[in-house]
Image (tube, grey):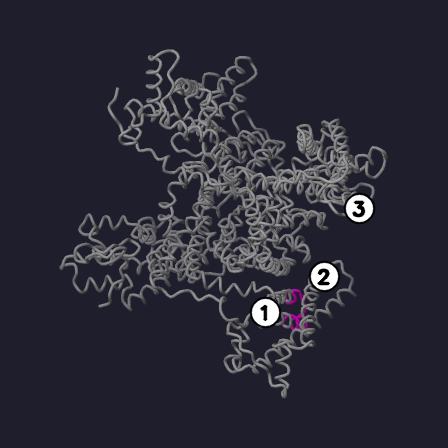
Amino acid sequence: MEKLPTHHKDQEDATSSPLPSSELTPLVSTKSSSSTNNDARLSLFLFLEAQTTAGLRYESFTILLILLSVLTFIIGSLFLPQYNTNSTIADKCGSICDAVWFGNYPDNALQGLGIGSTSLVEMFIVGIFTIDYLLRFYTADLIHDKYKGIMGRFKFVCSFFSLVDLASTVPFYVDSFLLPDTDLAASNFLRMFRLLRMLKMEGRYDLALGMIDDVLYEQRGVLGTALFVGMTVWGVMSSFFYLAERKNVDMIYCLNSWCEDVDTSLCRIDEFGFVDCTEAGCPPTSSDGGQEVVCWNVYQSIVLSSFWTLMELFGEFPLVDQHSMWGKVLGTITAVFACAVFALPVGIFASGFEAQIARRRMERESGGSSPMIVKGGGDEEDETGWEIVEVVGDISTTRGKVYNFLHLQNTASSKMFEIFMNVLIVFSSLTFMLSTMNNLSPRWQLLLGWFQFSSVAVFTCEYLLHMYSAGENPKFRGKGLLLYATSFYRAVDLVSILPYWLTVLSWLFVGGSLAPGSVFLLMRLMRFEKYTKAFTSFDDVLRDNMDVLAMTGFSALLLWIFFSSLLYLTERDSLDKDMANYYKSVPHSMWITLLNLSGECPLAHYSGYGKIILGFISVFATAIFGVPIGLLGAGFEELVTEEEDDDNDESSDAANVLAPTSSSSIGDGLQTACYQFVNGIGSNTAMRFELSIYALIVATAIIGVIQTVAGYDDFFSWLEWVAVSVFTIEYVLRFIGCGADPEYSGLSFKRMRYIFSFYSMIDLLAIVPFYIALATPTSWVDRHDEYFRMLRLLRLLKLDKYIPSITLVDDVVRLKKNVLTVSCFAAVTLWVIFAGLMYVAEYQDFSMEIDNLPLYGCVDGCTMSVRFRDYFSSFPLTGIHLTGDFPMVEYGGMGRVILFFIVIAAVGVTSIPSGVIASGFADIVQSKTKKGPTAKGSAAGDDWFDIKYRELEGQSPPSSSFGPTVDRLQFAVKHYLDGALDESSGKIVRTTFSIIGRFFFMLLIVSNIVVVVLESIPEIDKYVGNDQGNWFDVFEFWSVLFFTIDYALRLFSAKKSREALFSPWVYAFTFFGIVDMLSILPWYVQLILSKSGYLNGDEAKVFRIFRIFRVLQLDDFVVAFSKLDNVFRASKDVLKATGLMAVIIWVGSSALFFIFEQNNPNFRTCNASVPLTGTLDKPGCYDFESTQECNDYYPDMCSQSAFTNMPNTMFYVAVFLGGDWGFVDFTWPGKLVCMFLCVAGIALYSIPVGTLFDSFGAVIGLGEDEEEEDEETSPKS
């Protein structure tokens, strides 16, 4: 008999206690009775648990059945004509085919059985699994003693894997025998649960799904706190978005099965939130439920708002161009701040998985498993993986001479040939890129074609010579030649030339384009790998992480298939035609679900069940699905990072950037005085002048942004006169004082050097255009004044002197130069190659229609072929995808396959340079702001309150000036509200009355939150009404009364509360004091305004929404938000520098997008009466240079959907920097800005978010223990 594997943590006597077991790793109990431990039942048990050779084969057979079952369900969804209306294969599976494989229809060849729609495959699989389940039920007591007897078997039936088995078999019998005439669509889907049977093999195939309970348990403390923070932010932001958008007609959505192309400006929204679009051509909607709702505002209630807010909190803005002004303000706040807070639970969940994986790997390695074999660190190896052995070819033979020339490269001519080949690789790649341009003349096309042909001919000859001469090395003879042919460089050579020759043959005999084969020439860029050793590290990464990748990758695959099938069922019958089209089959569903699992939400209008599923995917599944992708990227980064002894020296040298500027100066008295004055040195007046300059910079930047809004052109224009005058004076003083600047010490032409210095150029660009426009009122500069006003924003760069940020970039590059060199090569190479592949896949894709793109020459019936019309158009779009964002989903089959590899592998690798820059920046700043050790007992982010709180430890509260009676009353109130500390046990003790009161207030808080949500639902709101004295008003009155009493009692007892530092004033301004005030103040304000006649019933609802802040009072039960100020203080040093960097990138990129895109016709819409294109006599919508010119010709008929002013643009750019590209069809200057943000901008902008994440973990982690209250009850009166 084979010995069963055991998983002991501690060695125990097998005869005294059962072996440790679980449902995942069932083991035979050694305490089983002799009657059950007979040979037949034990042999059967061992067979079922794959503990025998035959059992292992049976396990493989069941895996095959599971995969067959899943595949038949997935493929079968393609053969449903009612969903796949435009498919050429939907009706190809006839009655017999359906009866054998899929069972889609009850009238197939098995109709005579009378059991509804089924198939032979499904009947066979269900039969096997039914027998399997019955046998497992029969031997359940051998798994564990707890499964003995009738009650034990009942426990077995209720176990996880038993329920999985039942869920995947019982619906078949219900559907076939109990309800044969009904269509239980979900019964077929339930076979997906068979995938979970894989979890039974955890001992051999460890899955990430099996770690969920471990992760939740280990992260329970900080995860619970983070979840409370995330849920609270979600609820509050959902409420505010509801307020901002509930009357926004742009947010009205109509089912396109009822009415298409609705002009929502003609719709009306009543006081309760019901939408009427009858004037727009839609059927009327009855609010009493008599008529199906056709149109509604997607933010018409907090419940609906919560879905869209959830997407935005994850960085996805599917309705980015439809928000109102206040919606955009909230969206900006969400993108800049709220996303960082809301991402905490998901980040903690994902990091918990990674920690769990690392721990299990260490346990396996410490358990004696063979260590990983890692390349490097030993003898040098060649491209085949063999140790390099110096072999010199026989110079008396041709093969030997060729070998020495190509392999050894030990002569000047061979080195020149290497340079020639490298140059040819670059030029052949450029040739392919240029050849994709449609506006090239035939002569240029012919020239490029011949150059490409010649290049490939040379590459082919080189490849053949390499293969011919390789045999000179004994290791490459015989079978070794095959290994050499499959080595990295030779594989790159073959892949780059073979497709070209195949397409040439196809072109000669069939015709067509050479582009599909020519694109593979870009693969030869990987030949530069020999100088960086980047891609050859991938095999090391894969080998080092193979066990983890197999584990997490298979779990990710299960999630992908499972959720794809689930969303297919919920959305295939959607009344929204676009949604139904993307979910018409499981393979189609898998494309969108892949993007959902990677953190994207390109589609929006899901059904109710679809929204719930998508919310679950966003919160949990993305954390698991992203683990293997993150592991690839992290493993690659770890491998290419080199340890250098002089790194610390470089870091310390760079640290001097933040050192205070020396106050010593050179030069005469006037120069020194001017220098010290403008640099805030020597006097309080000089310091105030310097600070006033910084304040003026910020003020003029804000005014410059506001002045781009129509109607605010002259907003605070007088301040610009003052600012230019002050900046001019400052510049003159700096010019005079530069002779005393130590930076120019010992240099000649000091003033000339200053004029051309970085900050001098900023000053000149910010003030000189003002004087030119003033002196020449009709000049070109004056006519383009709105553009030159944007130069004021350059003054923000001067803040770098006060808080160094931009000037640290060169230090970051120097600190991380090694890993940046390697990772940038890998990222750029992948970018170039995938851009070419996407071009080839999409340049002839006419399958799906997209918006008009007049800038690209398409005004109607546009497709993806317009976006990917040439290689250079494909490049920025591919860059957006490589950042992990997928704003475009209208791809053909080949495009989706390429994007699958981008999601799985390329995103992780191409994000490494951005991550390296971000981490390097944080390291530089932190190394310059290190402080000494903190005081004993202190924590990260402590401020004066925390210090004072520790000082009061052990001190008695002050006595009341009103005598001992008030003292006793204050103590009694304090004990009622917060309990009393039992000195002997150190626990908080509460009276029964205190416990009841605490429970009552928690219930009251939750009830208020629920009422706020219910009141926002139009049907409930209309039923209750908006008249004064309605049920909501009564409930609010009593709630405010109790909250007011509670607030007054807390103020009264603050003299005896150490948490209030024994002061009512301190309590009033603590987090809890402010929250208590916010929970009651809006009601009193509403009452005053209502009595004064300034509010009606609907407007009063705005104030009632502020009750949502009462959720923060739950922080008294789960401490979280009261720690946020500590989080900000703990990271303030990095936040100051990186925050300024983020602001500069945000504002600067916004200014550039505004300048380049404000008149982009791709974002222009016109009234239906305006032709899209016109004639010389009557121009069309897209014929004007600017939207203003269009409106001058067609008054108020033309509008720009985006980038209309700086505030509008800043909202969109905040979304872009959060990683969501709501717009992609930019002008070429806009595409360059887009590519900058893809490469570096997003990484630098995200540093403050990462800093907050780290600080939150530190602060909450330190405070975990003290926030857990063990409370006991005591019968005190």
The type of residue carrying mark 1 is Val
Per the rendering, the mark at residue 492 is: 1
Magenta-highlighted stretch: main secondary structure?
Answer: helix
**Residue 1167 makes an appearance in the image:** no
Q: Which residues are magenta?
A: 502-518
Neighbours of disc 1 within 10 Å: few (<14), some (14-19), many (20+): many
Left or right of 67: which side holds 22?
left
Image quadrant holding the C terminus, namely top left
The N terminus sits in image quarter: bottom left
Q: Earlier in the sequence, mark 2 or mark 3?
A: 2
Mark 1 / mark 2, whichever is N-terminal: 2
The quadrant in which residue 642 appears is: bottom right
What secondary structure is marked by label 3?
A: loop
The alpha-carbon separation of the residues under discs 3 and 1 comes to 55 Å
- How dense is the environment of label 3, judged by Cα within 10 Å: few (below 14), some, or many (20 and up)? few
Instruction: Confirm or deny contact between disc 3 and disc 1 (CB under 8 A).
Output: no
Front of the two marks 1 and 2:
1
Task: State how far apart marks 1 and 2 are (Cα).
Answer: 22 Å
- Give residue 502's quadrant in the image: bottom right
Q: On the image, numbered disc 3 is attached to which residue?
A: 749
| 932 lies above or below 811 | above
10 Å crowding of disc 2: few (<14), some (14-19), many (20+): some
Q: Position of residue 726 (x, y in %)?
A: 75, 30
Relative to residue 614, is residue 92 depicted above or below?
A: below
Q: Is residue 1202 magenta?
A: no
Would residue 1084 be visible to someone looking at this image?
A: yes
Q: Of callouts 3 and 1, which one flags the residue occurring earlier in the amino acid sequence?
A: 1
Residue 42 in percent (x, y) is at 20, 62
Residue extending furthest toward the bottom = 396
The residue singled out by tag 2 in the image is: 434
